[in-house]
Image (cartoon, helix red, strand yellow):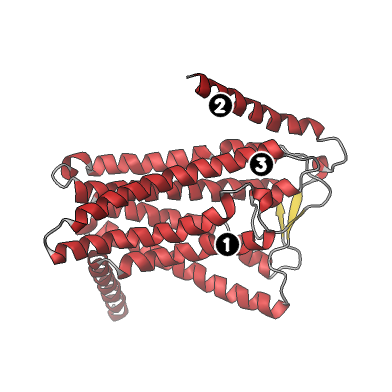
Amino acid sequence: MSSTLRLLVIWKSVIFAALKTNEYSNINNCSSSVSKFIFLGFPFTWEIQVLLFSIFSGTYILTLTGNLCIICAVRWDHRLQTPMYILLANFSFLEIWFITSTVPNMLANLLSETSTISFCGCFLQFYFFFSMGTTETFFLSAMAFDRYLAICRPLHYPTVMTVQRCIRIGAGCWVCGFLYFLLPVYLISQLPFCCSKRIDHFLCDPGPLIKLSCVPAPATEIICAVYNSVLIFSTLFFITNSYTLVIRAVLRVPSAEGRHKAFSTCGSHLAVVSLFYGSIMVVYVSPTAGNPAGMQKYVTLFYSVLTPLFNPLIYSLRNKEMKAALRKLFRIVRFNQSHGRNL
C-alpha cells in the first residue's frame, strides 16, 4: 500500500510539473501567434511527390473498398452475424476512420506548395489519430478474448459471448479508446510553442510537437511515454497470453482438420497483431525525443497507411467463411448491376 501511495504521489508531481510548463509560455515564444503548423512531410522532387500521391491514393481507395466489403459481408450474410465477425466488422469500420484521419490531409499536402494545418486542426488530428489507434489495441484484445473463449471454453462460449455482450464490449472499446489520450493531448496543446512552426512529419505526432516547445518539457514527455507503454504492453500481454492458451488448446485437438481451422483463424489475428504492434513499439514505447524524425515518419507511414490495407486482405484470404460471404456479396452486386442495365 505504501509503495502504491508513493507511486501516486510521484505521478501527481509529474503531472503537476507538466502543467507548470505552460506558465513559461510568455518567455521567448510566439505561442500566442501560432495559428498554423507547416508539415515538412517527404522532401522529394515534384515528380516523386506525384508518384507518392498516386500510390497513396490507390492504397486509400483499396483500403476503403476492402474494409467496406468486410462490413457489407457481415451485414448481409446471416451466418456471419456472430460475435467474432461483429468484432471484425467493427474493426474494419475503425480502420476506415483510422486511415481517413491522416491520408486525405497527406494527399492534399503532397500536391501543395505549402503543407500547412491549423493549430486546432493539428490537435484534432492528433486526438482522433491516437484515439483510434488506442481503440484498435482494445479491439485486438477483445478479438483475442473472443478466440480464447471459443477455443478454450467452447461449452461456455454461447452463454458468455452473446451478441448483446459483444456489442457492449465493442462500445466499451470505442469509449475507452477516445477517453484514454485526453490528458496527453491537453498537456501538449498547452506547451509554449516557439516561432519555428515546422513539424518534421506528415501528421501531428507528439514527438515533433514537443520538439517545437520553447521550454524543456520532460514531464510531458514522460507522461506520453508512460501512457504509450502502459497501453501497448498491457494489451500486448493480454493478447499474447490469450493466444498462448489458445495454441495450447489447439495442439490438444485430435482432428488435424480442426487444428488447421483453429490455426487459420488465430493466424489471421496474430498476423494483424504482429504488423500493428511491431511498428508502434518502434516509435512510441521509448520517450519521443529519443527517436529520429526520419524513422518516425516511415514507421508511422507503415502502421497508419499500410496495415489498414493489409488487414482486410489477411482476414479475407485466410478465412473460408469470409471468402464465401464475399463471393456471395459480389454475385449480388453483379446481379443488381446487370438487372439495372436490362431495365
Image quadrant assignment for residue 300:
bottom right
Q: Give the residue at x 60% y 23%.
A: 9
**Which of the pair 4/107 is nearer the observer?**
4
Instruction: Name the element at disc 1.
Output: helix
> In this view, which residue lies farthest toward the front?
3
Q: Position of residue 200 (x, y in %)?
A: 72, 59
The quadrant the C terminus occupies is bottom left
Residue receiving disc 2: 7
Q: Nearer the viewer, mark 3 or mark 2?
A: 2
Q: CA distance from mark 1 to mark 3?
A: 20 Å
Q: Label 3 near label 1: C-beta < 8 Å?
A: no
Q: Earlier in the sequence, mark 1 or mark 3?
A: 3
Tell whether 268 sits left or right of 212: left
Q: Position of residue 270 (x, y in %)?
A: 36, 59
Disc 2 residue type (three-letter)? Leu
Residue in front for this viewpoint, 297 or 122 = 297
The residue labelled by disc 1 is 299
- Mark 3 — residue? 221
- Given residues 242 and 2, the one toward you in this image is 2
What's the amino acid at mark 1? Val
Q: Amino acid at mark 3?
A: Glu
